[in-house]
Amino acid sequence: MADTVIELRNIVKRFGKVVANNGVNLSVRKGEIHAIVGENGAGKSTLMKILYGLYHPDCGEIILNGCKISRNTPQNAIKNGIGMVHQHFMLIPPLTVTENVILGIEPAKKGILDLAFAAKEIQSLSDKFNLKIDPSKKIEELSVGENQRVEIIKVLYRGAEILILDEPTAVLTPQEVKEFFGVIKNLVSQGKTVIIITHKLDEVMDISDRITVMKQGRTINTLDTAKTSPREIARIMVGRDVLLKVDKKPMETGNTILSVENLSVMKNASVHALKEISFQIKAGEILGIAGVEGNGQTELIEAIMGLNIEKIVSGKVSLMDMEMSKKSTKYRLKSGFSHIPEDRHKRGLVLEFSVRDNLILGRHNDFSASGFLQEKSINSYSETLINDFDIRPPDADVAAEGLSGGNQQKIIVAREFSRNFEFLLAAQPTRGVDIGAIEFIHRRIIAARDEGKAVLLVSAELSEILSLSDTIAVLYKGRIAKIFNASSTNENELGAFMTGAAS
């Protein structure tokens, strides 16, 4: 086709025994927003890393503007006008926007770094594409949404005509997503081509022109967005009908399981992260915490799990009648806590360890006798969880770092749900997870609630908070702005309290 800007033909990529891409074909038109969707491990990110030159295909062809690229590298991709914004931001917080953007291609005047010239160029890009970024600001002073826009400026500064965005809205609030989509549409209106990898089917329907569905390393179908539906896309992805809404029975509560009383936590020596937070969660209840990231969620999670005891200045955390405020994380886990951490790499996994070893992290004593690990028992346990939670590839010996982000998340979810717990702290439980796995994790959370467990759900996804929670607390500037009955509120009302527009 005359308007085709990219063709990937019969791309194959193997990692040892794992075939990540198995004869993939993809065609992207100039000036379109092309979404790539699929289950975790379908090969989406691998394919885009091949296009960007981070991986070399074992066989297949990359055709750009009708010309074959023989040996692609990130440097060549950038020269050819391809830029990639990765799921995890690659910014240095203490440096300014300008310093981050020009890293590696610093402009010089008579051998001296010319920051003023670079800042002017960055400001021009910000104005042209309505990115609203101040080149002089430090990254650590910016919101998550602004960080995302800095990453876009980085690739535009290098002359990108084709932008690859990997899970671009994973950490954005609904308001930030709306602004971000405005940015993307503006980019396309000015001649750019955008490829988006995402799991969020509602966003796919809002933003894309065409959708390519991948499954088990292959491209299954390419659809015109205007002629399809989230239900059809989910069915093609998963191979069956998927419940896009959570089905749960009315809440039946019991005794108070978790109690947080007047909890205050310091962010640093002079600034509070949390100020006199109080709430209770009863058996059979899910309390959702809604809030723009950076309003104290991380500190609350760490305080409840005993990860920042030294920063707690007042208040207490109790499990039933046991005060836990000064107890270790290990003690809390043995006493009935379970924890899906918000940052799976930092808190949830040892990436160099195998799937098997990650599945028993923190539970070694459960699989040991006389000081020796019981390998047979560990192998049986690992195989059961790999099957029950559909961890792909189904190989306990593979290192966790070799799995997709969604399958890494499944390892953590499998491990934490297999504990004997009374209280579950689920922080961003479905971040980067495909629609089929989201449905599965949601069902597990609801099942725990129906079994009389207490659940604290912290999520940046308001739709997830609203569909799973019985009660919702909005966290704003380290305080609980308001507590809602989940059945009597909506995204707009929650968003207003999250941003301080309502009080």
Image (tube, rainbow, N blue to C red):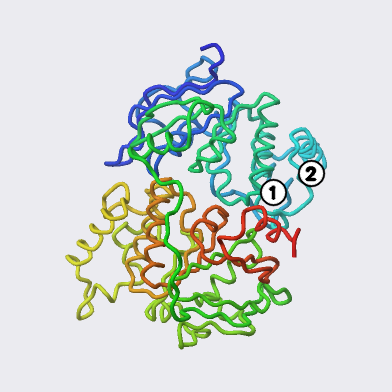
Camera-side mark, 2 or 1: 1
Residue appearing at x 54%, y 70% in the figure: 301
* Residue sitting at the far left: 376
Q: Which residue is mark 1?
A: 146
Please state which amino acid type lies under the numbered disc 1. Answer: Glu
Residue appearing at x 32%, y 62% in the figure: 359
Residue appearing at x 74%, y 38% in the figure: 107
Does residue 128 lie above or below 349 as drawn?
A: above
Does residue 383 lie above or below 470 as drawn?
A: above
- Name the foreground residue: 109 vs 100: 100
- Name the foreground residue: 89 vs 219: 219
Residue appearing at x 73%, y 54% in the figure: 138
Which quadrant would the C terminus be assigned to in this image? Answer: bottom right
Please state which amino acid type lies under the numbered disc 2. Answer: Leu
Does residue 313 lie above or below 474 as drawn?
A: below
Q: Secondary structure at mark 1?
A: helix
Query: At which x and y percent is residue 53?
Result: 49, 33
Q: Which residue is mark 2?
A: 115
Pick whichever of labels 2 and 1 is earlier in the sequence. 2
Cα separation, mark 2 vs mark 1, equals 20 Å
Q: Quadrant of residue 264?
A: bottom right
